[in-house]
Image (cartoon, rainbow, N blue to C red):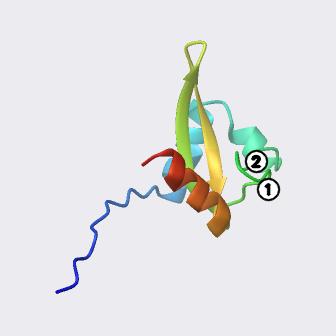
Amino acid sequence: MVRKEQSNIKAILDSDLEKLLKRTKQYNAFVDGELRCVYCGTTITVDNISIIIPSVKEGIEILNFCCDNPVCLAKFRNEHE
């Protein structure tokens, strides 16, 4: 018998992404192509966004992003196991 690993996938709608980016004051940076993948530096777009990584720095909530590159996704998984 093969045991399958179960994972929970959290998703966000495009309209919710816009609200989230506006709440963290990163919406304009997203629209202007200024947000980058934390692993490879690729510009984050609607087409390649894969993971949103929330963090708090100096009491301010910001979002970091991971693109859909398999190498970047593997780095994220390794850091968050």
Which residue is at 73% across, 46% downward?
A: 30
Residue 34: image x %, image y %?
82, 44
State the SS at label 2.
loop
Q: Hey, what amino acid is under mark 2?
A: Arg
- Residue 22 or 68: which is nearer the viewer? 68
Q: Which mark is residue 36?
A: 2
- Residue 32 or 57: which is nearer the viewer? 57
Residue placed under numbered mark 1 in the picture: 42
Residue 70: image x %, image y %?
63, 68
Q: Are marks 2 and 1 in contact (CB under 8 Å)?
A: yes
Indicate which disc, 2 or 1, sits on the residue closer to the N terminus.
2
User: Toward which corner of the image does residue 2 lie, by quadrant?
Assistant: bottom left
Residue closest to the far front: 1
User: Toward which corner of the image does residue 55 lie, by quadrant?
Assistant: top right
The residues bearing labels 2 and 1 have C-alpha atoms spaced at a distance of 5 Å
Which residue is at 72% across, 59% downward?
A: 45
